Amino acid sequence: MGVDLHIHTTYSDGSFTPREVVLYAKYMGISAIAITDHDTVEGNEEAIIAGKKLGVEVVPGVEISVCHGEREIHLLGYFIDYKNKALIEKLERLRNSRKYRNPLIIEKLREFGINLNLEKLKKELKTENICRPHIAREMVRLGYVRSVKEAFDLYLKVGMPAYVPKEKIKIDMAIKLVKESGGLAILAHPATIKLGNFQKYYEFISTLKGMGLDGVETFYNGKEDEMACKIADILNLLKTAGSDFHGINVEENSKMINYPYEILENLKKRYLQTTLPKSVIVLQKST
């Protein structure tokens, strides 16, 4: 039994539908996954239904784009109520910001002789939720760049000429949103934040714990973040793991990873502690 708790589908920037994700997890011998699409919960229900039929446990989740000062950070939410009205409305607002962002990206790319048809891309992908990886893959398909990485390195990542900032919410509000929808709030891939030394990471994560953070993604895409693991132990935060899977036909994050099921068991224990009445928890500890 194993888990992969960071999975994207076609509802954001993955190349597999939720059902295909479940099928692939089954094929890979993974018994439990979490659907964590960017700023949307729409893929959860389809995955859960497929999981019940195929014997794969599906944890409802989301990955929210947030900001802390000038930094862009990603927050994972697990065991969320994906039908929660406040959560859906806030995520929809974040996605709608792309309706204004994407045409600006396309226009900037046009200045470099890169001509993409955004409306055609939406129709081909059957989604309004177009993300930068979609644009990067289209650039590769049309021969403007050799790889998705090259598209980001030359044009699409922060600081490059076609980058356009997207709307984000403050991390304390995102944590609150996850908690109010019944979920656990987890800091995604902390190593990508690039804070520098141990003390800066410790102070940052400690601040987030004060906001209600439940855990840290300490195992990411096949690598262990030893610094994050140590901080999680000191602060008594959950340690989670995921591949950030986007599909097998993409250059990066193209492999599901079978992490120990114990990681999910620990998440479940914390989730039950936050949802069960305190009287039940006290009674359980006294027996």
Image (cartoon, grey):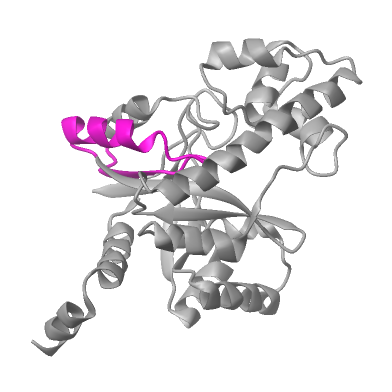
Please tell me which residue is depicted at 40% across the width and 25% down the height of the picture. Answer: 17
Q: Position of residue 242 (x, y in %)?
A: 44, 49
194 or 36: nearer the eye?
A: 36
Image quadrant where residue 103 sits = top right
Horizontal side of residue 187 vs 269, given as left or right: right
Residue depicted at 60% across the width and 76% down the height:
207
Q: Is residue 116 visible?
A: yes
The extreme right residue here reads 111
User: Residue at horizontal 49%, vertical 82%?
Assistant: 234
| Residue 60 on image: x %, y % | 34, 46
Counting the numbered discs, the total is 0
Locate residue 61, reporting x and y percent.
40, 47
79 up-or-down from 19: above or below: below
Q: Is residue 184 visible?
A: no
Whole-percent x, y for residue 113 in the image: 89, 14
Q: Is residue 77 above or below residue 204?
A: above
Q: Residue furthest left?
A: 287
Locate the C terminus and report the quarter of the image it occupies: bottom left
Range of magenta residues: 29-56
Q: Quadrant of residue 286?
A: bottom left
Left or right: residue 53 versus residue 103 is: left
Residue 276 located within the stretch drawn in magenta: no
- Whether residue 33 is in magenta: the answer is yes
Q: Does 128 appear above or below 234?
A: above
Residue at (35%, 25%) from the top-left corner?
20
Is 135 situated left or right of 10 in this image?
right
